Amino acid sequence: MAGSLEGLNVVEFAGLGPAPFCCMLLADHGADVLRITRPTAPGVEAKVNPADVLARGRRTIPLDLREASGRDAALELIARADVVVEGFRPGVMERLGLGPDVCLARNPRLVYGRMTGWGQYGPLAQAAGHDINYIAISGALHAIGRAGEAPVPPLNLVGDFGGGGMMLAFGLMAALYEARQSGRGQVIDAAMTDGSALLSAMQYGMKAGGRWNNQRGENLLDGGAPFYDTYACADGKYVAVGAIEPQFYAALRERCGIEDPLFDGQMETARWPLLKLRLADIFRTRTRAEWCALLEGSDACFAPVLDWDEAPEHPHNREREAFVTLQGVVQPAAAPRFSRTPAAAPQSERRVSLDAALAHWGALQPASAG
């Protein structure tokens, strides 16, 4: 068994960001993902790039979808697939003759996943955009950053990957489960605006309950609280503290030797700015390694802030094999972990011919998820 999704056949139309991330997740856990890419220019050799981590685990074939032969080949593969994933603007697949209506007519149990920023409909559906734009209208971006300063883009983790690729993967799994009962496929409209809004559900609830003041950098989880923030150490490196619960806050104070009664009013927000300054002074008295020796592994809710080079070498990550090296490229391992059907070690992207792809799936029954 190569993973819990072994036997799931996926056709992916190559794109950028969230759709490839979704398909990487599927491939990591055993799905047979066939990735359709654009052909290279005549005389140019197609090369696999090991640094393209999001492409791992796939078999890849070039098809010119502007030509009838390319579209026909894609439909032959789709007829044998359980899932299709595409990440183009609304209407592109329809113009290519590969929209959901055409594909579902060929394969009624197909789950057709569509990944966009704005969604398949709405006033902005046809506009260009990126992660930062999608999380801006969901409310998520407004909440991220320091008080009195501009919002800070959280890389592209919230829109592309959390609110995009992971939400699409969840939608595909839900639709596949339903198809087992009904025998019918359907279309998944995964929008990063919707997904990033959903990721903010807790904050919307806290705001409704009067526990979030809608001002950036002044709240419990946005760096406003002195016991939930990052601090510079004597060597210029940083540590992260998240001692929210009273018993964990007490453990932090005890281990740091903080006896100042000013710290007694943990949830008195008026004290927070001064407490942050006091804690900043305290953490600057030792190096990050010294703070790790004192606090790491305790109930003080502490961790060092590691960079991309340090994270794979941390003892906890090494013990859990949270990172792997594939063709010299260090990258995150598959997650989450399964007790009975663990994911196999990831493989690099593999180029195959159309004949090989059709032969591989030729004997398979269409829509095996049914």
Image (tube, rainbow, N blue to C red):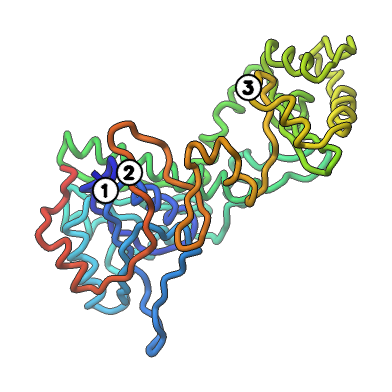
Q: Earlier in the sequence, mark 2 or mark 3?
A: 2
The CA distance from mark 2 to mark 3 is 30 Å
Q: Nearer the viewer, residue 243 or 259?
A: 259
Q: What's under tag 2, amino acid-wise? A: Leu
Q: What is the quadrant of the N terminus in the image?
A: top left
Q: Nearer the viewer, residue 300 or 62?
A: 300
Q: What's under tag 1, amino acid-wise? A: Val
Single out the mark in the foreground, 2 or 3.
2
Q: Nearer the viewer, residue 265 or 182?
A: 265
Look at the picture and state if 333 lies above or below 206. Answer: below
| Residue in the image at 69% along x and 20% along y | 300
The CA distance from mark 3 to mark 1 is 35 Å
Residue 60 locus on image (x, y percent): 32, 67
| Residue in the image at 44% along x and 43% along y | 166
Residue beneath disc 2: 172
**Residue found at the very far bottom of the displayed protein:** 43
Residue beneath disc 3: 206
Q: Earlier in the sequence, mark 1 or mark 2?
A: 1
Residue 363 locus on image (x, y percent): 9, 59
Quarter-of-image position of residue 98:
bottom left
Asked whether residue 141 appears in the rendered view, the answer is: yes
Horizontal side of 287 relative to 213 (left or right) equals right
| Element type at mark 1 | strand
Residue beneath disc 1: 111
| Element type at mark 2 | helix
Residue 220 locus on image (x, y percent): 71, 24
Q: What's under tag 3, amino acid-wise? A: Met
